[in-house]
Structures are given as structure tokens and as C-alpha cells.
Amino acid sequence: MNFHLKIWRQSSPTDTGKIIDYEAKNIPPEASFLEMLDIVNEDLNSRGEEEIQFDHDCREGICGTCSLTVNGVPHGPGRGTTCQLYMRKFRDGDTIYIEPFRVGSFPVIRDLAVNRSAFDRIMQAGGFISERSGSAPEANAVPVPKAIADSAMDAAACIGCGACAAACPNSSAMLFVSAKITHLGLLPQGQPESKRRVLNMVQAMDTEGFGGCTNYYECEAVCPVGIPTEFIARMNRQYTSAACQKAIGGVI
């Protein structure tokens, strides 16, 4: 298969950057999107040209590192990460636009690689459990209703890829933040600091410059693991309750 690629090239965070045309030739249909870029880079390297920089790690759809926008869609067509997008999804001769995630809080490092450390700082603000629980209890000592456990596991599936923020017209990170708050806050171990967690993580999200949710649902549409937007509603209720309690001088 052959493709005409229009790829964003940017030599540094301060460079203006531009779209440059490349030809991807003799690409196997079973090649993943990142493998296709590898083939293009090998061709560039053989000609002594600068290779295209992009993020990747596991290439198994579980790390969320491959922050590419393909034809205007974070991670490309279909639900999944870019490394799990295969070239057979495209037609021979297609023109494909490849850009980095377009989020102000994810500054471009170079070409298609972006700095997503804003998510790390949000997690540092409250995405953990610090209460001492002693040694590991018997598995059945703390009953957790199945519905609660299922919801917590659904929220814990978030891989923090940032596609939700990249798809949102407001560059909102609320789907990511709500997933982290939910998966910790639903379980007994996360209850003691649940109010502090939601206040601190939402404040960190705002400090990082992410926008608010206005119910476009683009985040849910591109999430590779299908995190539902109902977690955002849950986070908003929890945040309102915690903020009111703090305002009247209650213990948080």
C-alpha cells in the first residue's frame, strides 16, 4: 500500500512548525500506524534526512503514549490507541494528515511528540491513597458491592493518554480527572481523603490550564477504553459537596 502523508514538523517548542509532505511506499496492510512511521523514518534515515519524532512505548495499547492526531481525530479512526491502528483501515493511495495532540497544556516538544507532564502533576495533587491501612486484610473482610467494584474497575481502566483533552473543543481534562477520582473514591481505602482528593485534583487541573466540560461528549467518543462521561457528573457532585463543606469550615 502507498500513502501520501502530510506530517506536522516542528524542530523545537518555540518553532512555528509546518506541514510537510511525505510518501509512504510499499506499506504492508498488517503494519500498525507506528510501524508505518518507522518505515518512513528508515527511508528518511537512508537519505540522510531528519527523522520524524513521535512518542511510543508499549505498542500494545496500554500505555497511552502515542499522542497522535490522525485526520483530525486523536488516535485516528476507530476506538483504540494509534499503535493499535492498522494500515488496512485506510485505502491505498489515501492522503493522511498526522499532527500532535492539540492541547495548550500539552506543549509540543518536537514534531509529533508532546509534553503531557500536566497529567502527572494532577495525579501528584491527589491521585493516590495515603491513609495507612496496615497489613493486607483478608480478601472478604471488607465487602464491596459488585456494582461499586465494577464502576471502580471501569474508571481504573483509564490509561491517561490525553485523547479526551485533545478531542474536546475546550481542551478539557475532566474525563481523565473524573476517572482517577472515581476509581479511588469508590473503594473503602480511598474514602478517608476523598474530599481532599477531588478539591486538590480539580484545582490542579484548573492551574494547568485545561478547560471545563460543556457536554460535547467528544472525549467519550475517542477514549480508547470507553470511559463514560457519567464519571464527570459524579466528580462535579462530589466537588460541589466538598467545596461547600470547606466553605462552612467543615473538616476536609
Image (cartoon, helix red, strand yellow):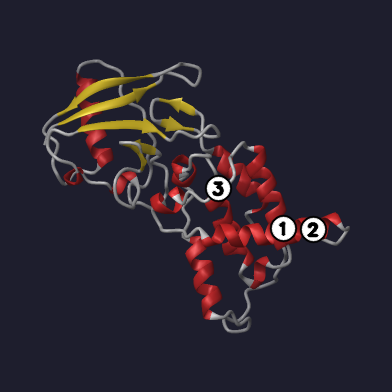
- The reply to whether residue 129 is in sight is no
Q: How far apart in space, not on screen, are marks 1 and 3 (Cα)?
A: 17 Å
Q: Which mark is residue 244?
A: 2
> Are dots 1 and 3 in contact, CB under 8 Å?
no
Query: Regarding mark 1 in the picture, which secondary structure is present there?
Result: helix
Residue 95 higher or lower than 44, as above or below: below
Residue 42: percent from left, percent from top: 22, 27
Q: Nearer the viewer, residue 220 or 203?
A: 220
- 215 lies left or right of 138: left
Task: Indicate the amino acid at tag 3.
Answer: Thr
Q: Where residue 95 appears, x then y in whole percent? A: 21, 31
Q: Amino acid at mark 1?
A: Thr
Q: Which mark is residue 240?
A: 1
Looking at the image, residue 196 lies above or below residue 144: above
Q: Position of residue 183 (x, y in %)?
A: 57, 63
Q: Which residue is mark 3?
A: 214
Amino acid carrying mark 2 in the image: Cys
Numbered disc 2: secondary structure: helix
Which of the 4 image quadrants contains residue 4?
Answer: top left
Residue occupying image coordinates x 22% and y 46%: 86
Counting residues from the start of the chain, the first of labels 1 and 3 encountered is 3
Where does residue 172 sit, x and y in percent of width and height? 54, 43
The foreground one among 33 and 214 is: 214
Quadrant in which the C terminus is drawn: bottom right
- Check contact, mark 1 vs mark 2: CB within 8 A: yes
